[in-house]
Amino acid sequence: MDVRVKICGLKHEAEVDAAARAGASYAGFVFFEKSPRNVGIVQARDLALAAPIGLAKVGLVVNPSDTDLETILRDVPLDMLQLHGSESPARVAEVKSRFGLPVMKAIGVAEEADLAGVAAHAQVADQILVDAKAPKGAALPGGNGLAFDWKLVAGKRWFRPWMLAGGLTPENVSHAVAMTGAVQVDVSTGVESAPGVKDLDKIAAFVSAAKSATTPPRL
């Protein structure tokens, strides 16, 4: 099965173009001021308009208010929202209903008990992003370049499609796919030369490695 790739934290048109040319399925734009990958409304609008047809445009937000989302969506033509904060299942359902876009909910995982959050949100979100849980006191809820024990999600099936994130690189993504059975993967830090600076060659290498990975047979 062809693995679908999301390149997150894109800030420049050349990065969007590189993701598309490599064969990525999703382009992620971060709307979180504390992140080195943060983009403003005008910048995000220009990037979204430059994205070719077939590259889904995902807006990453952290505990957004309705006003935050209205401000973004008024000008930026997104295809999906990614809620990457502490949003409850009820809030996920509310955002879906109010704004009419598919919603991906990120869940941080560090131990078996964290998977309960995945199951709960999978009842309402359109997709789940299973990420490494941010360290205590971390400024960023994601994009920390950390991996978690992939054995925790090996062979897991949930009510909605899910995507693997956290510490993935061009060097380890094939192994991660083979171990977990993930058919979608997300990367940000792993294709950067510095925080917030994407390496175009690494983007190409990551997508190539992900798409050449062998997923275990589905029973």
Image (cartoon, rainbow, N blue to C red):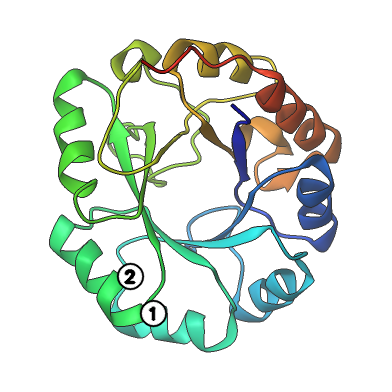
Against 101, residue 54 (above or below) is above
Instruction: Please identify the quadrant where the N terminus is shown.
Output: top right
Q: Which mark is residue 155?
A: none
Q: Hey, what amino acid is under mark 1? A: Asp
Q: Residue 197 or 101: which is nearer the viewer?
A: 101
Q: Which mark is residue 68?
A: 1
Location of residue 10 (image quadrant)? bottom right
Left or right of residue 43, residue 216 in this image? left
Tell me if label 2 and label 1 are in contact, CB under 8 Å.
yes
Residue 207's spot in the image, x, y percent? Answer: 72, 32
Q: Residue 137 or 172: which is nearer the viewer?
A: 172
Residue 156's spot in the image, x, y percent? Answer: 30, 23
Instruction: Please identify the quadrant where the C terminus is shown.
Output: top left
Against 55, residue 113 (above or below) is above
Left or right of residue 89, residue 97 in this image? right
Q: CA distance from mark 2 to mark 1?
A: 6 Å
Q: Residue at x 60, y 74 (%)?
A: 40
Left or right of residue 190, residue 136 in this image? left
Residue 165's spot in the image, x, y percent? Answer: 47, 33
Left or right of residue 153, residue 203 in this image? right
Q: Residue at x 34, y 85 (%)?
A: 67
Q: Which mark is residue 64?
A: 2
Q: Residue at x 79, y 27 (%)?
A: 205
